[in-house]
Amino acid sequence: MAQYYSVEQVAELLGLHVRTVRGYIRDGRLAATRIGKQYRIARADLEAFAGAPAAPATPSVDRARAEVSAVVRIENVDRAGADRLTTAVLAAIAGPREGGRPLHVETVHDPERETLRVVVLGDPADTAALLGIVHTLTSATY
């Protein structure tokens, strides 16, 4: 069975920043397979890129990992309100997180329907904390 590495694992093995590895993938210098929104690099492709045998992939942590994906739909939000909410949400996730795994957040405003969607991917505890912040922010009038 083929062995695959995450972008983070390749960055750690090669002593590079994750963005550098993603750049190599986008430029076609490092072959990778896209699965959803994430890339996986086959061991053979990593070895061809590095010119040396690759170390076996090891999980970053010894315990099970969980990730949450959540979509929050907020109604009756005009452009100014969407901008305020987006700024507040992005400010809330800025900075280092426990365990070093960032939350990924995207917002999409639909001016015709006056809705804002907040898409969150990340650690369950961090996601729950962010959803609590979104609840607090939306309890106010926008």
Image: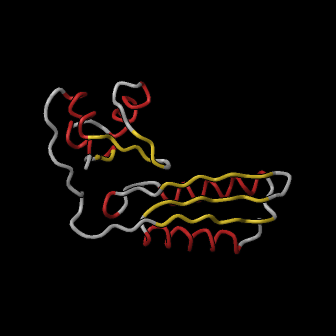
Horizontal placement of 100 versus 55: left or right?
right
Q: Note whether 19 is above or below 8 in the view shown.
A: above
Between residues 27 and 118, which one lies in front from this camera angle?
27
Q: What residue is drawn where x is 20% and y is 29%?
A: 50
Between residues 74 and 84, which one lies in front from this camera angle?
74
What is the x, y in percent for residue 23? Answer: 40, 30
Horizontal placement of 63 versus 35: left or right?
left
Q: Quadrant of residue 20?
A: top left
Q: What residue is drawn where x is 72% and y is 58%?
A: 116
Between residues 132 and 19, which one lies in front from this camera angle?
19
What is the x, y in percent for residue 28? Answer: 40, 25
Q: What residue is drawn where x is 23% and y is 63%?
A: 61
Horizontal placement of 75 versus 62: left or right?
right
Q: What residue is drawn where x is 25% and y is 47%?
A: 3
Horizontal placement of 117 versus 111: left or right?
left
What is the x, y in percent for residue 16? Answer: 26, 36
Between residues 45 and 9, which one lies in front from this camera angle?
45
Q: Quadrant of residue 74?
A: bottom right
